[in-house]
């Protein structure tokens, strides 16, 4: 049986004035919708940040199932030209670790080292006081309205594709 994960991609108006939307064909969507945009001075136009939220812990998968879901969601996000992925992996039922969190963050670290993703920002570092997060927030100011910024949420990871 294929692992279940929940995903939603949010993309509102582009500078040409039309709406584009994507959704995952095999997963449930997450209700919260956000539009993130920034100004590209080289193009003198407004560009949307495609942010996809993926819940890897839906249906309490085993670690290998969550990693399969991660791989599939990363491939789908690239296909959809998504630039930012917000992964919800949880932090463990006791709050002291979580095998899925550890495995996902290890995989993302390796992918960043190999150049398969641009970077990843762990939820505990998703704040204005973290240099890498602050750089992303300055480049894309609308991301500052993300509900997890500054909350030290160890149950999420931000991925830059």
Image: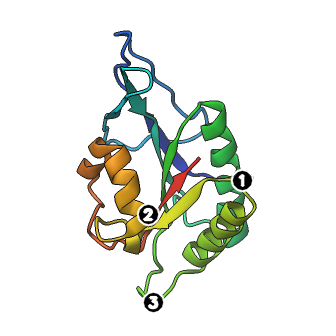
Left or right, 132 with reference to 73: left
* Residue 148 screen position, x and y as percent: 30, 61
Upstream in the sequence, badge 3 or badge 2? 3
Could you say which is closer to the camera, residue 3 or residue 133?
133
Q: Nearer the viewer, mark 3 or mark 2?
A: 2
- Number of callouts: 3
Is 34 rendered above or below residue 109? above
Q: Position of residue 134 (x, y in %)?
A: 34, 60
Q: Which residue is mark 1?
A: 116
Under circle 1, the secondary element is loop
Q: Which mark is residue 37?
A: none
Relative placement, left or right, of 44 versus 141 is: right
The reply to whether discs 1 and 2 touch (Cβ–Cβ < 8 Å) is no
Mark 2 lies on residue? 132
Mark 1–mark 3 distance (CA, rounded to whole Å): 29 Å
In the rendered image, the vertical position of residue 39 relative to residue 119, given as above or below: above
| Residue 141 % position (x, y) | 28, 44
Whole-angstrom CA distance, mark 1 to mark 2, is 18 Å
Report, in whole angstroms, how far the alpha carbon at label 3 lies from the one at label 2: 25 Å
Crowd rating for badge 2 (residues with CA inside 10 Å; few <14, some 14–19, many 20+): some
Q: Are marks 3 and 2 in contact (CB under 8 Å)?
A: no
Q: Nearer the viewer, residue 44 or 16?
A: 44
Q: Do the residues bearing badges 1 and 3 touch, measured as CB atoms within 8 Å?
A: no
> Is residue 11 in view?
no
- Depth check, mark 1 against mark 3: the one in front is 1
Look at the numbered disc 2 and give the secondary structure of its residue: helix
Tag 3 residue: 96
Residue at x 65%, y 53% (from the top left corner): 117
Identify which residue, 84 or 39, lies in the foreground.
Answer: 39
Up/down of 101 relative to 36, above or below: below
Tell me: 94 left or right of 103: left
Q: Nearer the viewer, residue 98 or 78?
A: 78
């Amino acid at each position: 049986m294929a692992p279940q994960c929940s995903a939603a991609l949010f993309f509102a108006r582009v500078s040409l004035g039309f709406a584009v939307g994507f959704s995952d064909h095999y997963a449930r969507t997450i209700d919260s919708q956000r539009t993130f945009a920034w100004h590209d001075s080289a193009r003198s136009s407004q560009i949307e940040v495609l942010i996809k939220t993926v819940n890897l812990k839906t249906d309490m998968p085993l670690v290998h199932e969550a990693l399969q879901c991660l791989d599939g969601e990363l491939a789908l996000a690239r296909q959809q030209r998504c630039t930012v992925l917000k992964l919800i992996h949880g932090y463990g039922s006791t709050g002291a670790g979580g095998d899925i969190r550890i495995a996902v963050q290890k995989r993302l670290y390796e992918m960043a080292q190999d150049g398969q993703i641009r970077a990843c920002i762990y939820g505990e570092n998703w704040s204005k006081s973290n240099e890498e997060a602050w750089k992303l927030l300055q480049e894309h100011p609308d991301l500052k309205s993300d509900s997890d910024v500054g909350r030290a949420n160890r149950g999420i990871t931000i991925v830059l594709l």
